[in-house]
Image: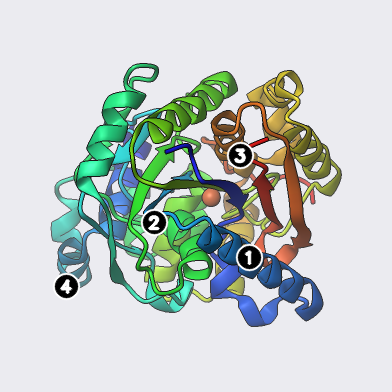
Amino acid sequence: MSLYHVQKLLYLLNRDGELRRRFQGDRAAVLEGYELTAEERGAITAPDIGLLYVLGVNGQLLMHYAALCGLEWNAYLEAMRDGVRRHGPVRAGVYAMVPD
Amino acid sequence: MPLVFAGACSHAPGITGRAERAEPAARDRFYAALERLRQALEAARPDALIVVAAEHFANFFMNNMPAFALGMADHYEGPIEDERFLRIARRRVPGHRDLSERLIRRVMDEIDVAYAEEWLLDHGIAVPLSFLTPRFDLPIIPANINCQGPPLAPLHRAYAFGRALRSAADAVPERVALIGTGGLSHWPATPNSGKINEAWDREFLRRWSAHDKAALLSYSDAETYREGGQGGFEIRTFIAVAGAAAGATGEVWCYEPIPIFAVGCTVAVMHLGQ
Ligand SMILES: [Fe+2]
């Protein structure tokens, strides 16, 4: 169930400026409060947008997080494709990659 | 006062955020239709605007996800998105707490709606407002239909929510307008962003314009997901507008598939007062 907690953190980061500032100052300290696997913790911290996508993070949450991390639009789309190349298909949720 | 206006339009963030990357002729036809919608809304002289949107985790999350929600505050903040990403400056948008409360009481006769005294706007409301009330000066009443975190309310409930909004608006003395915002088929926030199923969209808009209620409510979520992507779940907002305009037929003023905006860009109205 920890995908829920990954998404909860991104949800809160997107809407709470104060949490964003704390997160940007000390990511590890903010992540302490969430039940996350090592893989999830690493993906958020890196940030590895591609892996977060494959883990099944809701696309709307991830799109905002990618913008927060400074990824330009095309770089963000490419990061998701790259994630699928490296880690295989999306594992959960409704934002899977489909044939064009 | 009977509902004074019912319309619908797209809300994708690219519409403002990636404007210069669209094919100019299609983009400008879409923007012109939004301007026409702005003028029609203004001509209806509304005191307040209900915006039925499909928000994207600005306020509601899977810890406590309402199928339907209405704002009940005197003002709302937003958009929450990075300002450079959306190109809409953060601001405070006026609400109308008293009117919201009266509407909510009436809606509750038919729908168990959640209410929220705090509400952050995201692109689902901010993008349409940036065209329809560019000074952000008309009091709004935000409404949300959960189109993000399944399980989702079935389509006939979205229609009933629109019908309840209509009964409520008709019962207050204020002049209330309503717009729905959302995508038809689209695959936003995936590597397929830009994929659009134009044939599916046009058939949906045909059913919507004809107010063919049975056909409009016949889509299963599995079919919508297959043909219209996860973004297609937002047809609920258009269906709510149809519910608010029971007995009326509609007209599509614009349908332009614009891949960099990630959606078939739509502007449509229901002809109230028929
Ligand atoms: Fe949306």
Q: Amino acid at mark 1?
A: Leu
Q: CA distance from mark 4 to mark 1?
A: 42 Å
Q: Amino acid at mark 4?
A: Gly
Q: Are marks 3 and 4 in contact (CB under 8 Å)?
A: no
**Marks 1 and 3, the one that precedes in the sequence:** 1
Circle 3 SS class: helix
> In the rendering, at what x and y percent does residue B191 appear?
65, 57
Bin the neighbour count of mark 2 within 10 Å (Cα to Cα): few under 14, some 14-19, many 20 and up.
Answer: some
Host chain of mark 2: A
Q: What residue is shown with label 1? A: B34
Foreground: disc 1 or disc 3 = 1
Q: Residue at x 43, y 54 (%)?
A: B46
Q: Is residue A48 visible?
A: no
Bin the neighbour count of mark 3 within 10 Å (Cα to Cα): few under 14, some 14-19, many 20 and up.
Answer: many
- Quick check: do tags 2 and 3 share a chain? no
Q: Residue at x 39, y 56 (%)?
A: A43
Q: What residue is shown with label 3? A: B238
Q: Is residue B106 left or right of residue A27?
A: right
Q: What residue is shown with label 4? A: A25
Circle 1 SS class: helix
**Marks 4 and 2, the one that precedes in the sequence:** 4
Q: What residue is shown with label 2? A: A43
- Quick check: do tags 1 and 2 share a chain? no
Ligand 1 neighbours mark 4 (CB distance < 8 Å): no
